[in-house]
Structure formats: C-alpha cells, structure tokens
Amino acid sequence: MDANEVEHLREEITAILCVANKEDEVLVRLESGGGVVHGYGLAASQLQRIKEKGLKLTIAVDKVAASGGYMMACVADKLLASQFAYIGSIGVLAQLPNFNKLLKKNDIEFEQHTAGEFKRTLTIFGENNDEGRAKFREEIEEIHVLFKDFVQSQRPEMDIDKVATGEYWPGIKAKALGLVDDITTSDDYILSHYPAREIFSVKYAVKKNVAEKLGMSAANVVERVFMKSMNKARHWF
C-alpha cells in the first residue's frame, strides 16, 4: 500500500467519523496481498481509528488478505472471508539482487560511504559480507516479532505460533485456525442487513481540474479507437 492509497483511506475514515453514530457499523471490503511494512502499519492504524471512536468495525475479505493485508484485516471486531479467499501469510520477506561480480567483470568500480556501523547492511552493487547479512536477518526477525505481537493483540484467542509461519490458507481453513470469524462474502453480509439498516458507500475521489479531465477524455477516445481496430483484426473461434 503506497502513500496515496493510505491517504485515500485516511480521508474516507475521517469522513465516516465526522457523521457516524455509536450505533453505526463500518464495513471495509479489503483485498490485498501485502507490501511494504510501514505502509500497511499505517493503514492498520487508520482502521483502528474507527474502533477508537466506539464504532463496530467489520472487515470482509472476498479474495485475499495476506501479509500486510492481514495486518489490516485482523484489526476488525468481526473478520469475514469467502470460503476460498487467501488468508494469512504472517511473515516478512526481503530480497535483493547483487551485481557486484558483474561490475567487477566489466571493470566498473562502485563506492558507497556511510556513517554508522549498520547504516547499510546489504547493497545491490557493493560486496556484501556475513556480518551485514546477519544484521539484515536480525532486522527481518525483529519485524516479524512485531508483526506477530500486533496480530496477537488483535486476536488474543489465536495460537499465533501456529499461524505465524508465513503460510496462507483458504477461508474455510483460516476459520478453523482462528484467523477469521465467519465464512461469507461481503455481498451476502450487506444483503443480510438490508432493508433493516441504511447502507451508504464511501469512496474518496480526487477532484480533477479541467485540463486533467480533457486529457483523460482524449486518452479514452484513443483507447476506444485502438480497441475497435484490434477487434476487427481479431480472430474468433
């Protein structure tokens, strides 16, 4: 989740909190396979704002909530998942290539200057050593511990050591492991509350100026012409 996506989530939640009552329930449709730690950590904190205001937070996962996506999902008071949604992946991944041998082979020198023993543990261009690798591994393990502690704080009844292996499971198995509360889709959950409750959809949209709108219109015309020509040339069986 990048900065723009977190910003949109923040705006949507702020809008809800400005008008919601204590009796209201917030349903978040979540679909994410994970990403950078700080982005998803902030996104999870944004969702916690809903609970801090005394509102019930329900999160529905129709397809996937893995890694950082599950970090967000576990914040829910009630966590729903479809039967084949991918759930879990409570782990940390970090990988990078190293081109040092390739640079040496082509007589290319690389310099890197740092202040602080572990300012840069691994590099993609320099020559890495065992000490740097060990420190990098240590940092990954620390993040994993923080991840596990956060999930455990949100779902204390779950056996965290059993599920924090980096694996993911379909919704049905995830329920048996305590990762989710109920098996259903977001659509069925919404319909189960209609028409007894009023339902509103909230989505943040960036206001576009005239130039941006004209640019998008021109792009749409070009795309339609291109697709029309492609359809004429396409063979159907």
Image: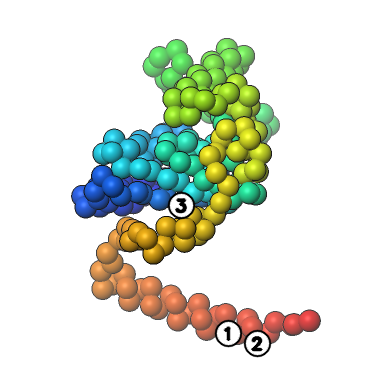
The amino acid sitting under disc 3 is: Arg
The residue lying furthest to the front in this view is 196
Among the 4 quarters of the image, the one containing residue 227 = bottom right
Numbered label attached to residue 29: 3
On the image, the x and y values in percent for residue 85 come to 61, 48
Instruction: Find disc 2 in the rendering and name its residue.
Output: 232
- Which residue appears at 43% of the width and 19% of the height? 119
Q: Could you tell me how far apart the alpha carbons at marks 3 and 1 are, in whole angstroms?
A: 34 Å
Residue 53 at x, y percent in the picture = 26, 39
Looking at the rendered structure, the number of numbered marks drawn on it comes to: 3
- Mark with earlier residue (3, 2): 3
Tell me the kind of residue under disc 2: Lys
Query: From this viewpoint, is residue 104 visible?
Result: no
At label 1, the amino acid type is Lys
Whether residues under marks 3 and 2 lie with C-beta atoms below 8 angstroms apart, the answer is: no
Element assignment for label 1:
helix
- Looking at the image, which is closer to me, 133 or 82? 82
Vertical arrangement, residue 195 with respect to residue 232, above or below: above
Query: Is 189 left or right of 82, judged from the image as shown?
Result: left
In percent of width and height, residue 181 lies at 53, 39
Bin the neighbour count of mark 2 within 10 Å (Cα to Cα): few under 14, some 14-19, many 20 and up.
few
**Mark 2 to mark 1 CA distance (whole Å):** 6 Å
Q: Earlier in the sequence, mark 3 or mark 1?
A: 3
Label 1: which residue? 228
Q: Which residue is at the front of the view, 160 or 189?
A: 189
Residue 97 — which label? none
Determine whether label 2 and label 1 are within 8 Å by CB.
yes
